[in-house]
Image (tube, rainbow, N blue to C red):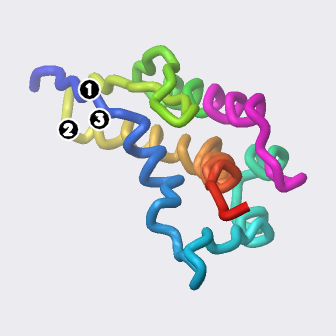
């Protein structure tokens, strides 16, 4: 079978994983609270170290993004350059090249684990911190 190349936007995955646009709202239309204790109880050790103080700094966000990018590369995907995707969010695209459909699925599964292990909870807290409130 010929090699297949798939280009996917990490931003789409990150947006799906960290989207707050669909989060529950209170009666006065302010964002619902973030349950940091629940996040800390279920996140990876890597992300827990970043989230323990309840705040994600720009440097910590970048650290998580770089760790995810390195993990994606180790999984067999070819990550592109990090760029700003809007609203100060940084992301990257990646390519998957595989000889078979099964190989492609295996690489994608490993890369998806990178999102869970290194970025999804940090990204969710980062996005929550940036929500506008009536204050």
Q: Do the residues labelled 3 and 1 touch (CB within 8 Å)?
A: yes
Q: Do the residues labelled 3 and 2 touch (CB within 8 Å)?
A: yes
Q: What crowding class fits label 1: few (fewer than 14 Cα within 10 Å), some (14-19), or many (20 or more)? A: many
Q: Main secondary structure of the magenta part?
A: helix
Q: Nearer the viewer, residue 58 or 63?
A: 58
Residue at the disc numbered 1: 98
Q: Do the residues labelled 1 and 2 touch (CB within 8 Å)?
A: yes
On the image, the x and y values in percent for residue 21 come to: 46, 60
Q: Is residue 104 left or right of residue 67?
A: left
Q: Helix, strand or loop at disc 3?
A: helix
Residue at 45%, 66% (x, y): give it. 22
Q: Is residue 73 left or right of residue 35?
A: left
Residue at 77%, 44% (x, y): give it. 56
**Magenta-colored span:** 51-67
Q: Nearer the viewer, residue 44 or 89?
A: 89
Q: In this view, does 1 lie to the left or right of 45?
A: left
Q: Nearer the viewer, residue 103 or 133?
A: 133
Residue at the disc numbered 3: 103
On the image, the x and y values in percent for residue 29 come to: 56, 74
From this viewpoint, which residue is outermost toward the top? 81
* 54 inside magenta stretch: yes
The quadrant the N terminus occupies is top left
Q: Decide: is 19 above or below 4.
A: below
- Going from N to C along the chain, the mark reached first, 3 or 1, is 1
Q: Helix, strand or loop at disc 1?
A: strand
On the image, the x and y values in percent for residue 76 come to: 43, 25
Measure the C-alpha gap from mark 3 to mark 1: 6 Å
Residue at the disc numbered 2: 101
* 63 inside magenta stretch: yes
């Amino acid at each position: 079978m010929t090699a297949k190349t798939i280009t996917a936007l990490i931003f789409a995955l990150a947006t799906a994983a960290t989207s707050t646009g669909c989060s529950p709202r209170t009666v006065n239309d302010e964002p619902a609270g973030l349950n940091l204790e629940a996040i800390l109880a279920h996140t990876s050790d890597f992300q827990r170290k970043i989230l323990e103080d309840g705040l994600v700094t720009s440097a910590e966000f970048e650290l998580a993004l770089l760790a995810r990018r390195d993990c994606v590369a180790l999984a067999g995907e070819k990550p592109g350059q990090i760029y700003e995707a809007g609203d100060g969010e940084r992301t990257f695209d990646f390519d998957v090249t595989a000889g078979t459909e099964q190989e492609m699925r295996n690489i994608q599964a490993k890369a998806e684990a990178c999102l869970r292990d290194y970025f999804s909870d940090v990204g969710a807290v980062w996005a929550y911190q940036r929500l506008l409130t009536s204050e």
